[in-house]
Amino acid sequence: MTAQGEHATSTTAADVPRRNWAGNVRYAARAFHRPTSVDELRRLVAGSNRIRAVGSGHSFNRFGDTDGDLVTLAGLPPVVDLDRERGQVTVSGAMRYGDLARHLHTQGYALANLASLPHISVAGAVATATHGSGQTHGNLASAVAGLELVTADGDLLRVDRDADTFAGMVVGLGALGLVTRVTLDVVPTFELRQYVRLDLDREALDEALGSAYSVSVFTDFRSSRLREVWRKQVADQPPPPAEWLGTTAADAPRHPVLGMPVENCTPQLGEPGPWHERLPHFKLGFTPSSGDELQSEYHVPRTAAADALAALDDVAHLIAPVLLVSELRTVAADELWLSPNHQRDSFVLHFTWVDDTAAVLPVVAQVEERLAPFAPRPHWGKVFVTDPAELAARYPRHADFAALLRHLDPTGTFRTELLDRYFPR
Ligand SMILES: Cc1cc2nc3c(=O)[nH]c(=O)nc-3n(C[C@H](O)[C@H](O)[C@H](O)COP(=O)(O)OP(=O)(O)OC[C@H]3O[C@@H](n4cnc5c(N)ncnc54)[C@H](O)[C@@H]3O)c2cc1C
């Protein structure tokens, strides 16, 4: 028995994380498991009345927390199977994007987009519709062409884009089964350059967001001006001109959170490099972001960017004291039922908060109230307090997903308290 009262089962179950990356969630599981084969995983699921998978634990809420069994799939034999003809790669669900990216690059391939950090697992990121930035690029789940998962009865189910319910299964919140393999679309490898520009006028936000392959704008709600624009542009395109949109060029590398080490960040100052060393803000071997933090994020229609930002003006004095940094991004629309980008090109407002849940939650509620006219869809892996009925109304396929849940998991094997709140049985 450990201090939390849980006991370890299966090989090296001690390696299963007991808390999430941020430390605001200590997993309540009664037992932790690290199976080393798919058959062992199938037996584990078949014999459990409540079980969940944990990826790399980078989510900030309790969707993945269970009082039953918590299992990491990181002990399963790794799979990376590149199909050059189809332009797809099939990988283990537990593989980190950073490891996959390195491999793909050596084979002459790339993924169209990546999140700000490469540390996250493919299955965990896809389950929550994790995204990068770029108004013509979908979120990471939109690149999924197939899934293999262990369903509640311990069966192995394979689905691909031809399946009727596929669009409902990809952003599955970990609630439809334990994902052992994911097939992703790939593209030929490419090079990017990253330029940071300082002090953007809000009037120029729309133009800045659409100005390169992937653009992130950082701000702190202490001024109406926007602090930094991180432009990740295709390497053979010319750099932004000296007077670009009234900004000035950063003359040294930056970290999104002021005062944090710039060594943790991917190269800037226009140095060309492969896609996977420019699209994430943070390097694989280093701590991403701050570490002592919480995060929230809201997707609103792309066309509402300026209005949504302006709607937060009268709560900026509440936001700023509990904020480390805010990031503004874009994501292209997709058809996935629970994707925050479902049938909606999106403008995305991200908040990296201080590590103080009690101080942050009231501000989160204020932010959600101000954004409500834009029907914000919260990031499934971050902190939000949205009323379940309101959230359901923002997803046209919410009822279909709830039906899929009942169909694939009739006895609630993968149910968690938070899932029950947003998808009542
Ligand atoms: C520093 C930092 C930066 C971030 N940057 C971004 C960003 O740029 N863009 C963005 O969109 N998000 C970002 N996030 C959020 C993060 O990408 C998501 O929370 C993502 O889900 C984390 O992946 P994970 O592997 O850690 O999943 P976990 O947090 O471990 O799990 C997430 C969910 O997936 C389920 N799950 C995990 N593995 C499996 C599996 N094999 N089968 C079935 N279900 C599974 C879990 O049960 C849980 O419900 C960031 C988070 C941090 C901490």
Image (spheres, rainbow, N blue to C red):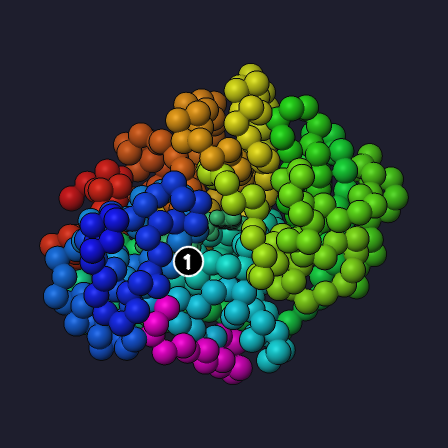
Q: Is residue 287 left or right of residue 50?
A: right
- Vertical relation: 283 (above or below) 83: above
Q: On the rendered image, what quadrant is the N terminus found in? A: bottom left
State the extent of the magenta-drawn residues as a range.
74-88
- Vertical relation: 390 (above or below) 265: above
Q: Is residue 364 left or right of residue 275?
A: left
Q: Position of residue 100 (x, y in %)?
A: 52, 70
The residue lying toward the viewer, choosing from 68 and 153, is 68
The residue positioned 57% from the left and 34% from the top of the image is: 324
The residue lying toward the viewer, choosing from 242 and 401, is 242
Q: On the image, numbered disc 1 is attached to which residue?
A: 56
Secondary structure mostly taken by the magenta-highlighted segment of the chain = loop
The residue lying toward the viewer, choosing from 183 and 292, is 292
Is 175 colored magenta in this rendering? Answer: no
> Mark 1 vs ligand 1: CB under 8 Å?
yes
The residue positioned 63% from the left and 30% from the top of the image is: 220
Q: Position of residue 340 (x, y in %)?
A: 43, 45
The residue positioned 59% from the left and 35% from the top of the image is: 325
The residue positioned 15% from the left and 44% from the top of the image is: 425
- Vertical relation: 281 (above or below) 396: below
Q: What's under tag 1, amino acid-wise? A: Ser
Q: Position of residue 355 (x, y in %)?
A: 47, 35
Is 81 colored magenta in this rendering? Answer: yes
